Image (cartoon, rainbow, N blue to C red):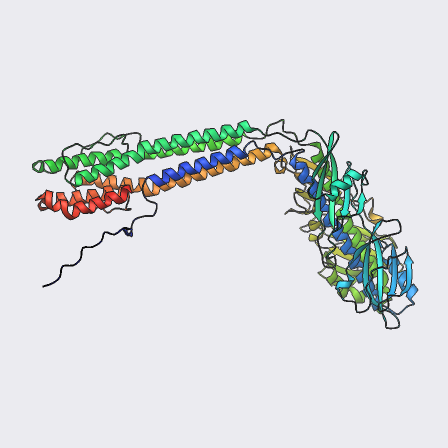
Amino acid sequence: MQAASPARRPRLFRRRRADMPLLGGVRPPIAVLLTLLVAVSCLALFTVGNSDDRAVSRAIVDSQGDIAADSARSLGTSIEANSAGLRDAVALLGRGRRKPLLDQLDSLASAYGKWRGIAVLDAVSGRELTSFGEPVPLKGAPRGDIDEDALRPRLAADGNGAALVVSYALFEGADGKKQLVVSTGALRLPNQSGGSNTYVVDARGRIVAASGPKAYDEELWAAVQDRDVDVRREGRQYYVVGRAEVPDSEHVKDLKLTMATVAAVPVGTAVADDRFTGLAAAGTLLAVGLLVTLLLVRYIQRPLLGLHQEAQRIARGDLGDPVAVRAARGEARRIANALESLRQQLLDRSAGFAPRTQQRRQRIGLRVIVLGCAALIAAWAVALPFAASARDDDQVPQQIGLDQQYRTQSAADRVHGTLAQTVADLSTIAQLADNNKGGVAKVLDDQLPGHDNWGSLYLVDREGKILARAGKTPLDTDRKAALAQVKTNTPGVVQLNHSGKVPVVAAAVTVGDGSRQLLVSELTPDAFNGVLTRSRLGRTWLVDAGGRIIASNQGFIAFSSPPRPNGDILAAALVKGVAATNDRLGWRVVTHKPTSWLRLAGYESERSAELSALLAVAAAVLGLGWLELTVLRPLRAAGRSAGALASGERTAVIYPVHQDEVGSVARSLELLRQQLADPRRETDHSTAHQGADDTLLLEIDREATS
C-alpha cells in the first residue's frame, strides 16, 4: 500500500510569469510622471531667477580668468621662442666656418635682437670664456655631463631685481671642446590698459614680475598671493583677481609659474536673486502636475480598474448586476458596453446573437485626455523661457567691454608676435647660414621642419625667380611686385595675394648685401588661426587693409567680409607692422562675442528656464509615451476585440498583451468567448467554471492588483 505523500508547504514566493512586465499596469507611468514633474519644479525653484553674483558680476570674474589664461599662454610661448631661438641659432653657427669665439658671439648677438646678454662657458668646468651685452646670471648654470633636461630655461633676476628668462644651448668650439651658450631675455608681460595689473607668481607664491598702474600696491599683492581670494573690496570698488598657470611646452617645463590679473570694478555690478520667478515657475508646474495626475487617475486609471473588476465578475458567472464603470470614456466605455451586451447574451441564450448596437461616439476619448495633459505641460514649458527671459534693463557691465577690447588687442599683439618671430628666425638663418659652404641654399631643408607655421622656405632673386626651396610649392603669383616692398637690409612682411581660395602671407629678409637675393617663408593658413583661438573670446577674424578675411578661429571664406552682428559685444584692434611694413599692413583683428555667452544673472536665469522647460517636456514624453504604449494601445485592441465578440464573432482568439489590468480584461473576454462558442461549457457552470478557470482568474486578479 502506497504511503500518502506529505502535504505540500505553501510557497512563500510565486515565480513571475514570463510575459509579466516588471513595471506593468496603469499606475507606474502616472506615478513616474508626477515624480518627474515634482523634480523639475524643484529644479526650477532653485535655479530660475537665481544669481551666482556675490560681490561683483560673475561675468567679470570669468573675464579676468580668461585674460589671465591668455596672458599665461602668451608668456609660455614667449619663453619657448627664446629657448628654441637660441638652440636654432647655435646649431646654425656650429655648421659654419670656424671663427674666433668673439666673432661668433658677435654674429650670434646680431642675429637675434631680443637677447639682452650672451655668455659662453666651458661646459665641463663652468668657467666663463667670454660674454656680450648685459651681464648674464650664471648661478645655477649646468656643467659637466649636461643632458636635455638641464638645458631647460629658468628664471633669474638682474641687478635691479627685474625677472629674466635664462636659456641654454650646447656648442662645439673651434678646439672641439663643448661649450655652453647662455642667453638672457626679458620676461615680457602683456601691455596693460583700463587700470588692470598683471603679476607672475612662482611655485612658492612669490611675485617675480608685475606691471600695471598699481602693480606694487601691497593690498593687491596680498590679494594675488592669497589663492582663495578672487574678489577683494577696497573702499567703493572691488578688485577682481583672475589666475591661470603658464602651460608647459617642448622646452619649457617645470617652471610652475602662475599668471594673475587684477582689475578694479566699481560697486553695483552684482545682481540680486529674483526668487519670485523661480517660485512662480515651480508652483505653476506643481499645479499642472497635480492636475495632469488627477485627469489621468479619474479618466484612465479608475475606469480601467473598474473594467478589470467587472470583466472578472462576468467571466466568473456573476450576471446579476449590470456592468457599471464610472467616468468611462472612449475605449473604456466601448469595452463596458460590450461587456454589458455579453452579460445579456449569457442571461438569455434564446435571444441568439445580438447584433452590434451602434453606440454614440463620444467626442472625449482617452487619447484626447492624454493629449490634453501633454498640452498643459507643453504650455508651461513654452511660457517659462519667455517669463524668465533677460530683461532690457539687464545691462552688460562696462568692464566686460573693456576686457573684450583688451583681449582683442592681445590677439592683435599675438599676430604681430608671430610675424616678428618669423622675421627674427629668417634673419638668424640668413646671417648665420652665410658662413656655411654653399650659403643659405644648403640649409633650407634642415631649417624648415623646425618651424611648424612655415609652409615653404625658398631663396629668390630680385626678379622673383626661385633659386632654391624646401617644403610645399610656393604660391604662383607675381613675386617681383610683391617683394619689391622689402628694402635692402630691411626685413618685411608682405601679403602675396588678395583673392583666391587660400590667403598667403610671407616674410622676407635680404641675404648678403640685400641687392640680389631674398630669403622668403610662406606661412601656413593655420599660422594665424591658432593665435586667434582663445577660450570664450568669441568669433575672431583677421582682416587685411581692404577689410577682407585672411584668417579666423572658425571656418571662413577667404577674402570675404566679416558679418556685422548687432546687439552683441564687438571689438577691433590694429595689428602692428613689422620693420618696413609698419605703415603698410593695415591689418585688424575683429571679435564678436554674443552677450548670451556671458554669465550675467539674466542670461543664467534664462538658460535655467530653458533647461527646466526641456526637462518638463522630456518627462511628459516619457510618462505619457509609456502610458500610451503599455496601456492605451493594448486597451484599444481589447476594445476592438470586445466589440467584435459582442456582435457575434466567436472564432478569433483574444490574447492578452501584458499581465496587467488590460491583460486581465483580455483574459476575461477570452473566457467569455469560449463560453459563448461552446454551450457545453455553460453546463454545471457553478462547478466546472468555479474550478480551473476560477482559479486562473483569481490568480490574474491577484497579479493585476498587486
Q: Residue 393's spot in the image, x, y percent?
A: 63, 26
Q: Compared to 373, does 547 lie above or below?
A: below
Q: Is residue 566 left or right of residue 666?
A: right
Q: Quadrant of the N terminus?
A: bottom left
Q: Quadrant of the C terminus?
A: top left
Q: Residue at x 38, y 32 (%)?
A: 292
Please name whichever residue, 10 or 125, is drawn nearer the observer in this view of the structure. 10
Please name whichever residue, 342 or 586, is drawn nearer the observer in this view of the structure. 342
Could you say which quadrant of the image residue 125 lies in? bottom right
Q: Is residue 170 left or right of residue 658?
A: right
Q: Compared to 158, does 61 lie above or below?
A: above
Q: Residue 276's spot in the image, x, y percent?
A: 54, 27
Could you say which quadrant of the image residue 227 lies in? top right
Residue found at the far bottom of this picture: 176
Residue 57 can be seen in this image: yes
The number of discs equals 0
Please name whichever residue, 126 or 654, is drawn nearer the observer in this view of the structure. 126
Residue 462 can be seen in this image: no
Q: Is residue 391 left or right of residue 663?
A: right
Q: Compared to 636, does 98 lie above or below?
A: below
Q: Residue 559's spot in the image, x, y percent?
A: 69, 45
Q: Residue 526's spot in the image, x, y percent?
A: 69, 52
Could you say which quadrant of the image residue 535 lies in? top right
Q: Residue at x 77, y 36 (%)?
A: 194
Q: Is residue 702 left or right of residue 603?
A: left
Q: Compared to 436, does 50 lie above or below?
A: above
